[in-house]
Image (tube, coloured by chain):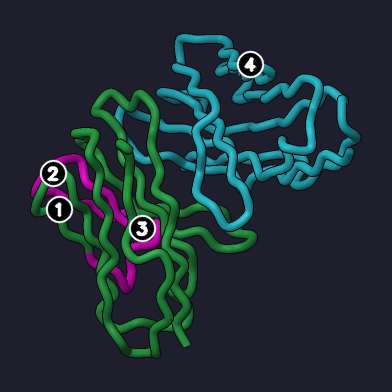
Amino acid sequence: KQEVTQIPAALSVPEGENLVLNCSFTDSAIYNLQWFRQDPGKGLTSLLLIQSSQREQTSGRLNASLDKSSGRSTLYIAASQPGDSATYLCAVSNQAGTALIFGKGTTLSVSS
Amino acid sequence: NAGVTQTPKFRVLKTGQSMTLLCAQDMNHEYMYWYRQDPGMGLRLIHYSVGEGTTAKGEVPDGYNVSRLKKQNFLLGLESAAPSQTSVYFCASSLRDAYGYTFGSGTRLTVV
């Protein structure tokens, strides 16, 4: 059974700092991996999608990497801002079009 | 705007009452999903559908039923609500090839 773990559960950093969020999964045979952002009381917003054949994806200040063999992904946030404060969720799918399996998230707080 | 729409956004039920949550998507996605999100538990899959007229159980299906009579709609029913079903419910949809998932904004359900 696929399990997704995110470390740390919470993280507080000062504005401007670069940071890394970690995600690990137990079954390396994934189809894709997706990072989401969730603001308090809101739904999920997709940030980056990495297909199993890819090593990384970038969007603005965000960079996500994927190492299938070790069962790990990282989300790198450059020059953090208070507006980045949210919960970041990592999720994997094992087959095309199948349901995502989520980690419990990392709650990020960026202070000004 | 294209996307996933959930109705209602909030609801309070008494134990034993029934209700239906509606999810509608206008992106012609084949796959649709219902998740629940609880503190400390993350998002867990309740039921999902791989196409019109099909449904399947997820990780936590007990106490829920679903229907997908039309491709764009996915209904989640609670026949006899219990306090343990107090949660935030999210609907999502995806293309057959799993190129990303789109989530609704959620339904906050309280059972008293």
Q: Which residue is mark 2?
A: B71
CA–CA distance between discs 4 and 2?
35 Å
Quarter of the figure with residue A47 = top right
Q: Chain of mark 1?
A: B
Circles 4, 2 touching at the beta carbon (< 8 Å)? no
Looking at the rendered image, the disc whose residue lies closer to the viewer, 2 or 3, is 2
Amino acid type for the residue under numbered disc 4: Gly
Task: Please identify, in this view, whether the residue under mark 4 or under mark 1 is nearer the observer.
Answer: 4
Q: Secondary structure at mark 4?
A: loop
Q: Residues within 10 Å of mark 4 (few under 14, many from 20)?
A: few
Residue shown at the point (90%, 35%) measured from the top left: A14
Disc 3/disc 4 C-alpha distance (Å): 34 Å
Image mark 2: chain: B
Q: Is residue A56 above or below residue B35?
A: above
Judged by its main secondary structure, the magenta piece is loop
| Residue range highlighted in magenta | B47-65
Q: In the image, which lettered chain appears green?
A: B
The cyan-coloured chain is labelled A
Task: State the SS at label 1.
Answer: loop
Disc 1 to disc 3, C-alpha distance: 14 Å
Residue indicated by mark 4: A60
Q: Are marks 4 and 1 on the same chain?
A: no
Which amino acid type corresponds to the residue marked 2 in the rendered image?
Lys
* Residue that badge 1 annotates: B68
What is the distance, in whole Å, between disc 2 and disc 1 at their CAs? Answer: 7 Å
Q: Earlier in the sequence, mark 2 or mark 3?
A: 3
The amino acid pointed to by label 1 is Arg
Labels 2 and 1 share a subunit: yes
Q: Residues within 10 Å of mark 2 (few under 14, many from 20)?
A: many
Task: Compare marks 1 and 3 and give the one earlier in the sequence.
Answer: 3
The residue identified by callout 3 is B46
